Amino acid sequence: MTASHFALLVDANVDVQYRCPVYKRFTAAGAPSSLERMAELYGMDSLHVVVNGARYDLEGVDSRTTLLDLIRERLHLTGSKKGCDHGQCGACTVLVNGRRINACLSLALTHDGDAITTIEGLAGGDTLHPVEAAFLEHDGFQCGYCTPGQICSAAGMLDEARQGQPSYVTDDADHVELTDAEIRERMSGNLCRCGAYVNIVAAIRDAARPAHGS
Ligand code: FES
Ligand code: FES
């Protein structure tokens, strides 16, 4: 497909999308639509990212490469796990500019200029991140396959709660309290096949205590 064919395809689809209320809301807010972003990315194959504080200038990145595959296969940071590769299990969770995402659902080239934190970069040197320390203390894992995603997700989730972002089970949106029900709801995108949930919740509850300041 040539660039001009792609532009025609985008034009045709944009006409359809203009009738979509969600598309209208996004464009009204000034955010580019996914199709506009795709058009921008067409022909692009390089990006720079900062991963765990180190800058990478990468060339020859296939436009179909997910962020998870880039991190694991190109940067050889294999802490982030591939469980389902379909956004269902949370094993691939990383922080992008401080916000948790499923890296298997995100194309690498859309992260040009982003700061990414994986499980390898969460600790401060030899000092464990409070969530990591709490997982150790509470035995928040068994086989450990889901653990990097659980810990990155919990770190992101604690920040969301601290910023006062409510969840589906929040009773009082003006006062977010991290009850066990809140923790379970907010971590519901991270599955554990070993069923270590009781200890995972205990670890996150502990890490959320002000003294830990995660
Ligand atoms: S591997 Fe990404 S959500 Fe399962
Ligand atoms: S500890 Fe084994 S999948 Fe969670």
Image (tube, helix red, strand yellow):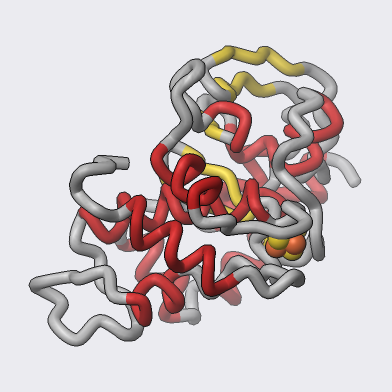
Image height of 7 relative to 67, above or below: below
Image height of 82 relative to 198, above or below: above
The picture quadrant where one finds residue 72 is top right
Image height of 97 relative to 165, above or below: above
**In this view of the protein, which residue sits in the foreground, 106 or 75?**
75
Give the residue at x 50% y 18%.
126
Q: Is residue 16 left or right of residue 43?
A: left
Q: Position of residue 132 (x, y in %)?
A: 50, 42
Q: Ligand 2 falls in which quarter?
A: bottom right
Q: Is residue 53 left or right of residue 164?
A: right
The picture quadrant where one finds residue 168 is bottom left
Q: Is residue 27 left or right of residue 72?
A: left
Give the residue at x 44% y 35%.
129
**In this view of the protein, which residue sits in the foreground, 67 or 201?**
201
In the image as oriented, which residue stretches furthest toward the left? 174
Count of picture labels: 0
Residue 174 visible in this rendered orientation of the protein: yes
Please state, as top left, top right, bottom left or bottom right, where the C terminus lies in the image.
top left
Residue 8 visible in this rendered orientation of the protein: no
Q: Position of residue 154 (x, y in %)?
A: 46, 55
**In this view of the protein, which residue sits in the foreground, 26 or 11?**
26
Q: Position of residue 73 (x, y in %)?
A: 85, 32
Give the residue at x 53% y 73%.
198
Give the residue at x 39% y 71%.
183
